[in-house]
Image (tube, grey):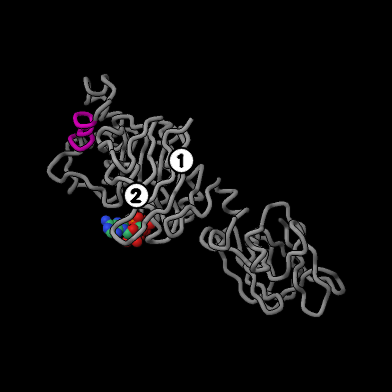
Amino acid sequence: MNSARVVGVSKKFGGVTALHQLDLQIGQGEFVALLGPSGCGKTTLLRLLAGFESPTSGEIWINNECVADASKRKPPEERRIGMVFQSFALWPHLTVYENVAFPLQHQQQVPEAFRQNPKARVAQMLEMVGLGGMEERFPSQLSGGQKQRVALARAIVFNPTLLLMDEPLSSLDAELRMQMRKEIQFIHRELGTSIVYVTHDQSEALAMADQIVVMKSGRVEQAGTPHDIYYAPESPFVAKFVGRANFLKGSWAAPGTFLLEKHGAPALPITVSRDFSAFYAQQVLPVRPDQLKLSAWQPGADGIVGKVVHVQFQGRELIYSIRVGEEEWEVVTDISERFAYDEPVQVEVCL
Ligand code: ATP
């Protein structure tokens, strides 16, 4: 069962086409991250789901009801949608309690028990976001992280069908962002609300989402689990945009067999089980830094030989830059796998 569906939606603003015939399904209780570079249409898609915009063509469905097409649009307050923005968007003249309680009076389809006893419901939500007892403060008396927690409590207080979040963590510092990631995931697990989360931070999408939708120029470039997006990118754009990728040069002998170019030696066949047809034209194989394994060079050994040109300490991991022929590959290893600068190493591709 889906909590929302976007069916063949296009959105034009004058001469600009922000979305092109876009399809998307958001499953019940699913955490979907919309990921893509600036201007690819993430916010536009979120605003269409929220009800602030109408599609130029196509349909938006929420809970098995068509809420918008080119000729009609159900307003936001009738869609049971919670929203959190980067800018918090709290009412400065209202207390924390009044901010969080606001949707209980103004949203439609609020469970009657919450309307009857808003104090208990607001207290429960503030407890959940770690702000128990802060009811009487005003937004100006809160830190950035606390403001974002109030915005979150306000978005979930009326038990929305869908929670829309537009870069909610981007105005927080790095440490707070990491902490809030966990808290949002906790709330998602506790409440089971479907979430659509806009970000241009690929690590956020990989860490939090059940489904990542990578967008480019108003289209879905690829949608899938974080694992699939990372290990089975369907285009060079996705391979580059999400995580790091090495593009190994060679030729595709057949689907499933890549012949790695080895200057002055026979090409090395690498068998792959995933569909990399999007990479046939460029004759490259996308390989993540954790899919390459290093070992000490053995004189006379077959395989790929490279040389360590750079190493970065990353706590439990090391990131090596390895020169192989004309190219430089990035390899992530465990901290225990130590190789010296200029040391020759064997490189194995482990797909
Ligand atoms: P960012 O990450 O920078 O917020 P985004 O992926 O959210 O970008 P959108 O804000 O959805 O992108 O914009 C998509 C395209 O539509 C852009 O080219 C933008 O300039 C255009 N656009 C968005 N809203 C409007 C508007 N109200 N009027 C005209 N053009 C618009």
Few, some or many residues within 10 Å of mark 1 (<14, 14–19, 20+):
many
Which amino acid lies under the numbered mark 2 shown in the image of this protein? Asp
The span from disc 1 to disc 2 (Cα, nearest Å) is 13 Å
Q: Position of residue 29 (x, y in %)?
A: 45, 33
Report x, y in % for residue 225: 55, 45
Q: Which residues are magenta?
A: 98-107
Question: In the rendered image, which quarter is residue 158 located in?
Answer: top left
Secondary structure, mark 2, is strand
As helix, strand or loop, the secondary structure at mark 1 comes to strand
Q: Residue at x 77, y 60 (%)?
A: 254
Q: Is residue 286 above or below residue 327?
A: above
Q: Residue 320, percent across and down?
A: 63, 69
Q: Amino acid at mark 1?
A: Phe
Q: Which residue is mark 2?
A: 166
Q: Does the beta carbon of the residue at mark 2 sit less than 8 Å from ligand 1?
A: yes
Q: Which mark is residue 31?
A: 1
First in sequence: mark 1 vs mark 2: 1
Instruction: Identify which residue is drawn at 71% across, 55% down.
Output: 351
Above or below, 25 relative to 39: above
